[in-house]
Image (spheres, grey):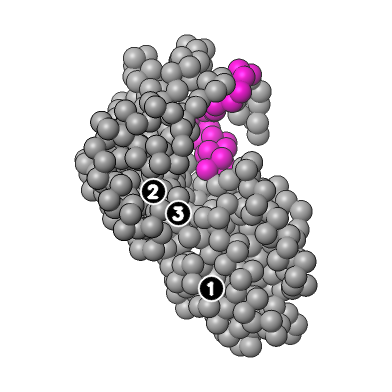
Amino acid sequence: MGGTEVYVAALAESLPAHGIASVVAAPGPAERRYRHGGVDVHRFAVTSRPGLAGAQGEPDRVAAANFARVLDAVHPDIVHLHAHTSAVSALLLDRARRTGAKTVVTYHTPTFSCLRGTLLHMGRTVCDGEIGTRRCAACALAAHGVPPAVARVVALTPPSLGRAVARGGGGRWRTALAMSAAAEAMAIRFGRLTDAADRVVAPALWVTGVLGRNGVPEDRTMLVRQGMPGVAIKGEAAGGRRAEDGPLRIGFYGRSSPTKGIDILTGALALIPDADVLLDVTVVNEPGSGREAEALRRAAAADRRVRLNDTLPPEGVVAAMRSLDLVAVPSRWLETGPLVVLEAFAAGTPVLGSRLGGIAELVADGVDGMLLPADDVPAWASAIAALAGDRDRVRALRAGVRPPRTMTDVAREMAAIYRSLAA
């Protein structure tokens, strides 16, 4: 579905070269077993009706019990969690530790520790990531449309009172008053998860700061950046179509989630109706993303420069990117990769990205791409219009692209961590 799933599959397929066999366990509606890309996959069943507590991340004991049966069947030396959800919680690590397995957690997205899910405080500025009940509750309330001044007052509700209110039923104001309890519960869950892990892996430098500010010891934190899966890039093989006359071709690849910012691109084009640009859009529509998908269809109908493409399998993305002048990554949350930047560089294509998180760590502004203010539609419009009229600059950015780090590098570093724990 997204970068985390692609990452896990690629890591599992790369580890045998280091003498390490992998099995993937993932939550699902029912227990089943199958093979994916040569790797055994065990689905463990989750609670069928999780309710509000489950939606807010309360650990699923049914899922943990079913995961324990996977442990009994596999007998792993290492259990490595790549998510932090109701179904994939610290309870799974507790079960693993009872069997004697060592445990690892990778922090893949801001949802690991952020109630809002973006690590943008009040949706505007990059948060330092330190979890605080009142601050996090106010920020989450603002994300649900509560005016910031009101959100800060409601966030003063004691968590104990919030829990009592939540037990009284649903409703907008009950949910708002209970937000302080939800923020406290998030902090507790994150603490239990990181306390139970023998190692916590950070795929980006900003993640190491978040972990440190929330009490994860430096000696248990490992920086292992993401890598490009399954593609060997050598010399001219990375080169794509050179910038030519005709429309400036920009591509967007990602989920339809608002955090990925496709609306920033369509909004930017609307501000520059005469710019000679073609926007190729390839999205994966997530469950519940009907509103975003419809907005995208309306944007494409209103602007012939926006072209909607069929979804591609992961192995076809790099080849498609080679035909582009730029790949746009307008995320409005802190990415830990993201994979799409690595794919663009594997294709030899420069990136137009948000100046946030992992994007800003991977893209060298003015060398192999451009970094723009996140969620600033006029700034994106101005940059796109300027590049459409300056193809020499586009050529220079393409010349600055270098082959990306690969999953081979990631597997080698992860294998060293696994061996140190097993020893």
Residue 148 drawn at (x, y percent): 35, 58
Q: Is residue 269 left or right of residue 402?
A: right
Q: Which residues are magenta?
A: 4-32
Between tags 3 and 1, which lies in front? Answer: 3
Query: Which residue occupies the foreground of this view, 294 or 262?
Result: 294
Q: Is residue 112 visible?
A: no
Label 2 or label 3, whichever lies nearer to me, is: 3
The residue at 62%/79% (across/down) is 271
On residue 377, which mark appears?
1
Quadrant (top left, top right, bottom left, bottom right) of the C terminus: top left
At which x and y percent is residue 299?
A: 70, 66
Q: Tell me the residue that label 3 is attached to.
A: 145
Residue 143 drawn in magenta: no
> In the structure shown, which secondary structural element does the residue marked by tag 3 occupy?
loop
Q: Is residue 390 above or below residue 23?
A: below
Residue under the image location 30 percent in, 47 percent down: 154
In this orientation, which residue lies closer to the viewer: 291 or 145?
145
Question: Eyeballing the image, is 418 above or below 301?
Answer: above
Residue 20: horizontal and vertical position, in percent? 48, 29
Say which amino acid is labelled 3.
Gly
Residue at 58% x, 45% y is 2
Looking at marks 1 and 2 on the same chain, the residue that comes earlier in the sequence is marked by 2
The amino acid marked with disc number 1 is Val
Give the side of residue 138 with respect to residue 264, left or right.
Answer: left
Judged left or right of residue 276, residue 64 is left
Return the mark for residue 172. none
Please check the rendered image and state whether residue 12 is part of the magenta-colored stretch, yes or no: yes
